[in-house]
Amino acid sequence: MDIVAWILIIACFVISFIGLVYPIIPSVLFIAAGFILYGLFYTFALPWWFWVIEVLFVVLLFVADTIANLIGVKKFGGSKAGMWGSTIGLLVGPFVIPFAGILIGPFLGAVIGELLVEKTTMKQAVRTGVGSVIGFLTSVAVKGTIQAVMILLFILAI
């Protein structure tokens, strides 16, 4: 039974990292599922500091995604339409164009949002698209680091 438990726990952690590049997968929920599975199979009696830090990291993960995208779009002169277009492109892109869609989707979404809603120039719309991709890549790096730290803390706590 230990083998099954650890396979499920590790699978949850692996899926959480897949969620970094496929944003439709809620990464933080899979990390939490790994912790819950550990509790169900073994014990929830982990040190108090573990639970406090993990809850703070969960909040940080939710905030990091939105802030990184917002900063990327805003830093390159984009508007709310560019941010919304980027977000929609990020969700749709991987399904329309597997693998490359994860970068092309937010770029095109931001460009289309800027051109259609804000009526900006093509040059500014492309700048916003680039900012969107940079924001997404920054978000992936930050969230990946946070998730790795969360799992490391879990290993130290058990």
Image (cartoon, rainbow, N blue to C red):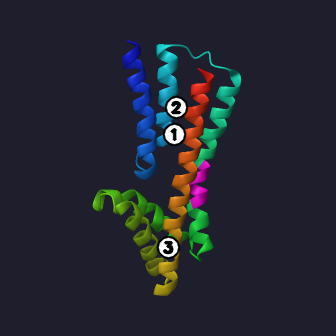
C-alpha span from label 3 to label 2: 33 Å
Viewer-side label of 3, 1: 3
Q: CA distance from mark 2 to mark 1?
A: 6 Å
Q: Position of residue 106 (x, y in %)?
A: 43, 65
Tag in front: 3 or 2? 3
Callout 3: 10 Å neighbours few (<14), some, many (20+)? many
Type of residue at label 3?
Val
- What kind of element bears circle 2? helix
Q: Label 2 neighbourhood size at 10 Å, few (<14), some (14-19), many (20+)?
A: some
Q: Is residue 1 above or below residue 92?
A: above
Q: Which residue is mark 2?
A: 32
| Marker count (numbered) | 3
Residue tagged 1: 28
Figure check: 134 above or below 126: above
Mark 3 to mark 1: distance in Å? 26 Å
- The kind of residue on which mark 2 rests is Ala
Disc 3 marks which residue? 130
- At which x and y percent is residue 156? 61, 25
Please tell me which of labels 3 and 2 falls first in the chain.
2
CB within 8 Å, label 2 to label 1: yes
Quarter of the image holding residue 115?
bottom left
